[in-house]
């Protein structure tokens, strides 16, 4: 099983699994706490409507008491600057050897996830992303 971040149309990031197949600990719910922007909701779909009507309207639920289908992370357009600043702060400096080889430094996995969200939101002007498992 894999976990993906989608914008409802496309997979924009696949959360990494460890070598033993365990899921990474990353959650969309961590972003507001760590970065300080946006909000995360746990959402559920009416399964009958999804199956028979292709209706994906969701309701927010309490994950401690209710079944949920996905996590939803949403933010405002103005928050992109803060998300970009976070990714930049988590990206290591490029060494001289990397410059010679024309390599770019990559941020850590959590920042890569946020970078994928930022790039998708800038490209498509979408500010809601879902964490799903399949």
Image (spheres, grey):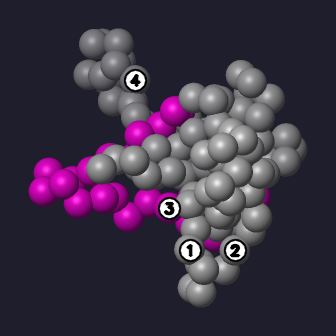
Q: Which mark is residue 61?
A: 2
Q: Earlier in the sequence, mark 2 or mark 3?
A: 3
For the residue carrying disc 1, how many other residues have a C-alpha within 10 Å: few (<14), some (14-19), or many (20+)?
few
Magenta: main secondary structure: loop
Q: Label 1 to label 2, Cα distance in Å?
A: 8 Å
30 part of magenta stretch: yes
Q: Nearer the viewer, residue 40 or 45?
A: 45
What residue range appears in magenta? 11-39
Residue at image location 69% in from the left, 74% down from the top: 61
Query: Residue 65, percent across and down?
Result: 59, 86
Closer to the N terminus: mark 1 or mark 4? 1
At x 84%, y 48%, the residue is 76
Which one is closest to the eye, mark 3 or mark 4?
3
- Circle 2: element type: strand
From the image, state whether disc 1 or disc 3 is nearer to you.
Answer: 1
**Do the numbered discs 1 and 4 sit on residues whose CB atoms are within 8 Å?**
no
Q: As rendered, which of 10 and 126 lies closer to the eye?
A: 10
Please tell me how crowded label 2 is: few (under 14), some (14-19), or many (20+) other residues with Cα within 10 Å. Answer: some
Are the residues at dot 2 and dot 3 in contact (C-beta closer than 8 Å)?
no
Residue depth check, mark 1 versus mark 4: number of the one nearer the observer: 1
Report how far apart the C-alphas of labels 1 and 4 lie in the structure: 42 Å
Q: Which residue is mark 3?
A: 27
Q: Earlier in the sequence, mark 1 or mark 3?
A: 3
Q: Which residue bears the numbered disc 4?
A: 104
Is residue 130 depicted above or below 37 in this figure?
A: above
Marks 2 and 4, how far apart in space?
41 Å
Proximity of marks 1 and 2: CB atoms separated by less than 8 Å: yes
Horizontal placement of 87 versus 18: left or right? Answer: right
Q: Which mark is residue 67?
A: 1
State the residue lying farthest toward the left: 20
Above or below for 80 versus 131: above
Residue 47 drawn at (x, y percent): 62, 57
């Amino acid at each position: 099983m894999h976990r993906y971040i989608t914008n409802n149309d496309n997979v924009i990031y696949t959360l990494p699994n460890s070598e033993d197949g365990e899921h990474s600990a990353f959650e969309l719910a961590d972003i507001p706490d760590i970065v300080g922007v946006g909000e995360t909701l746990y959402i559920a779909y009416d399964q009958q409507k999804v199956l028979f009507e292709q209706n994906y309207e969701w309701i927010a639920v309490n994950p401690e008491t209710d079944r949920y289908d996905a996590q939803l992370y949403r933010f405002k357009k103005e928050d992109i600057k803060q998300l970009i600043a976070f990714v930049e702060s988590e990206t290591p400096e490029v060494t001289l050897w990397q410059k010679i080889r024309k390599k770019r430094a990559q941020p850590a996995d959590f920042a890569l996830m946020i970078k994928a969200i930022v790039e998708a939101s800038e490209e498509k002007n979408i500010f809601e992303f879902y964490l799903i498992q399949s």
